[in-house]
């Protein structure tokens, strides 16, 4: 299957700093990418849908100014957690959907963010 | 609303045992149903899917049947192996939505 990478795989930062997480589709172009957040022993919660060349669509309750999403190319979407706080500590997972694919999504391995 | 409920884990089985992981869902339309598997240190991988009622998805010895009348999509395998140890997520995509709704995941531990 297709490969999606995330970088970094883990990051530790101080409260108040910003952290950028990259999601790349390595062998296909993705017009749509999704960002999920996963708390320990809980489900993946959709945060936003990232559309190449346009603004992301955020789920209800997700702060746009807190979680900045940029999908500048067909193979890269970035999630920036701005002014991070300890409650932002979580596992962030992206997925990418190839064009013309309705049922197929490929997931990255996730990024664990710890805010001190 | 949309939700997916799956049995809590961990599920611990001996090798060659029969596996069932229950999954039920609520949806407003006619969803597609999925099982994803996450092996340690890896991303979620699609295990199987079913797109309409009575469809059976199957892969690697795993099966799940789309039961509209009971809104269920239970995962089964007749004989598990140690290599099946992973976290299994049930998910659906409701009509008109692009994103998936996931269950909370069930950790399976298979002992030799």
Image: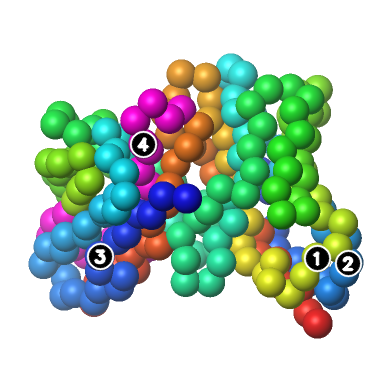
Find disc 2 in the rendering and name its residue. Answer: B17
Q: CA distance from mark 1 to mark 3?
A: 33 Å
- Residue at x-position 16% and y-position 70%: A15
Circles 1 and 3 on the same subunit: no
Q: CA distance from mark 3 to mark 2?
A: 38 Å
Find disc 4 in the rendering and name its residue. Answer: A98
Q: Is residue B23 magenta?
A: no
Q: CA distance from mark 4 to mark 3?
A: 20 Å
Mark 4 and mark 3 residues within 8 Å of each other at the beta carbon: no
Residues shaded magenta: A79-102
Q: Chain of mark 2?
A: B
Find disc 3 in the rendering and name its residue. Answer: A7
- Residue at x-position 68% and y-position 22%: B52
Against A42, residue B102 (above or below) is: above
Circles 1 and 2 on the same subunit: yes
Secondary structure beneath label 2: loop
Q: CA distance from mark 1 to mark 2?
A: 6 Å
Mark 2 and mark 4 residues within 8 Å of each other at the beta carbon: no
Q: Quadrant of residue B79?
A: bottom right
Q: Position of residue A67 (x, y in %)?
A: 20, 48
Q: Chain of mark 3?
A: A
Find disc 1 in the rendering and name its residue. Answer: B80
- Residue at x-position 46% and y-position 18%: B96
Compared across the picture, whether A1 is left or right of A25 comes to right
Q: Chain of mark 1?
A: B
């Amino acid at each position: 299957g297709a490969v999606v990478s995330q970088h970094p795989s883990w990051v530790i930062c101080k409260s108040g700093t910003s952290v950028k997480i990259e999601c790349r589709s390595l062998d296909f172009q993705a017009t749509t990418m999704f960002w999920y957040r996963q708390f320990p022993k809980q489900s993946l919660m959709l945060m936003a849908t990232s559309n190449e060349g346009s603004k992301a669509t955020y789920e209800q309750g997700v702060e746009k100014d807190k979680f900045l999403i940029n999908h500048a190319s067909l193979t890269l979407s970035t999630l920036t957690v701005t002014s991070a706080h300890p409650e932002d500590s979580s596992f962030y997972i992206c997925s990418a959907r190839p064009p013309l694919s309705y049922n197929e999504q490929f997931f990255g391995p996730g990024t664990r963010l710890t805010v001190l | 609303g949309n939700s997916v409920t799956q049995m809590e884990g961990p599920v611990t089985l001996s090798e060659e045992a029969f596996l069932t992981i229950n999954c039920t869902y609520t949806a407003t339309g006619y969803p597609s149903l999925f099982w994803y598997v996450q092996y340690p240190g890896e991303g979620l991988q699609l295990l199987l899917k079913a797109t309409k009622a009575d469809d059976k998805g199957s892969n690697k010895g795993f099966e799940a049947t789309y039961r509209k009348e009971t809104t269920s999509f239970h995962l089964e395998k007749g004989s598990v192996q140690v290599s099946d140890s992973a976290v299994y997520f049930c998910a659906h995509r409701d009509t008109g939505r692009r994103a998936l709704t996931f269950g909370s995941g069930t950790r399976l531990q298979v002992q030799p």
